[in-house]
Image: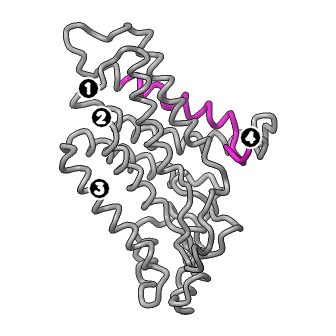
Amino acid sequence: ASSAPSSNNNGDFTNQLPTFSDSDNEGHLEIAKKLKNRNATNLSRKIFHAAFGIFYACLNQFIPRAKFVPIMCGITGISLMIELLRYRKGFGWINSAVHFCLGGALRKHEMEGKFTGSFYYFAGVTVSAYLFPQTAATMGICQLALADPSASYFGRRTRHIYWSRIEGQLGGIGRNKGLLGFLGGALFCFPFNYRVFKIAKWGAAGIPGGNMSLVTVSLLLGMAGAFADLAVPTPALVMPKKVLGVPVPPFHVDDNVVVPIFSGWACTKIFEYVGWDQGLKLADNFLL
């Protein structure tokens, strides 16, 4: 999913900071009434999420790292500033602007005091681009684009199959998610990964390990992305309402951060396992 759901253990941010005005609160709560909750399939949100991820994967692929990472740091910082301001007195108009731009792609809790998924999305892309080689970071972002919404979709479509549900038996890991959603997300990523790696710039020597290694890498990387999404519990783990008596923003563990970072890291380890070069370059037209 594009952002984590609200938690009963951490009340609305609007109720924690007294600088918010009633009129601003009424405005964003009126918007919230028009939105779907996290239990809805919301295909428009999933399509938007996937398109967003592919777009940023392309930017990471074609913009030099020395330029892309600072750009993404700026975007992430601006996004955080917007999230911190939009519930405060005098800034209620930001919620109207966000709703105008994103429309039904928003979720109800994102107008009830919680952050939107955008900040976490930008943060995940930024950290991935900074930490990993270009191809690993690009493919990590692609798993965010594809594994996250597809796992959510298949998980919701199979939630009536009770044996596949994790619920709370793994110490909170994957809480309220399902194994069939995980498998659906992994398999959904496989053909995309296979195609991208198949047309990569291998040179005259070809693919080390041949088609078997190509299948292995493509499947394992999809599984890594789907597993990262599975591991983030629902509702999300959130910060306490106050730290040392000071109210803090409602930061939480979000799959938009976990999926690209874990997938990028997994990509480097999978390359090591099959003997692929970490400096492998993807094709210029890798999306075609």
Q: Are marks 2 and 3 in contact (CB under 8 Å)?
A: no
> How far apart are the two marked residues, 3 and 1, measured between alpha carbons?
22 Å
Please tell me which residue is depicted at 53% across the width and 45% down the height of the picture. Answer: 149
Give the class, few, some or many, for how many residues have Cα within 10 Å of label 2's Cα (few <14, many ≥20).
some
Say which of 171 and 86 sits in front.
171
Q: Is residue 186 magenta?
A: yes
Q: For mark 1, what is the residue?
A: 279
N-terminal-most mark, 1 or 2: 2
Q: Amino acid at mark 3?
A: Met
SS class of the residue under badge 3?
helix
Q: Amino acid at mark 2?
A: Pro
Q: Are marks 4 and 2 in contact (CB under 8 Å)?
A: no
Q: For mark 3, what is the residue?
A: 72
Secondary structure that dominates the magenta span: helix
N-terminal-most mark, 3 or 1: 3
Q: Are marks 1 and 2 in contact (CB under 8 Å)?
A: yes
Q: For mark 2, what is the residue?
A: 133
SS class of the residue under badge 2?
loop
N-terminal-most mark, 1 or 4: 4
In the rendered image, residue 50, in percent from the top left (x then y), is placed at 44, 46
Q: For mark 4, what is the residue?
A: 170
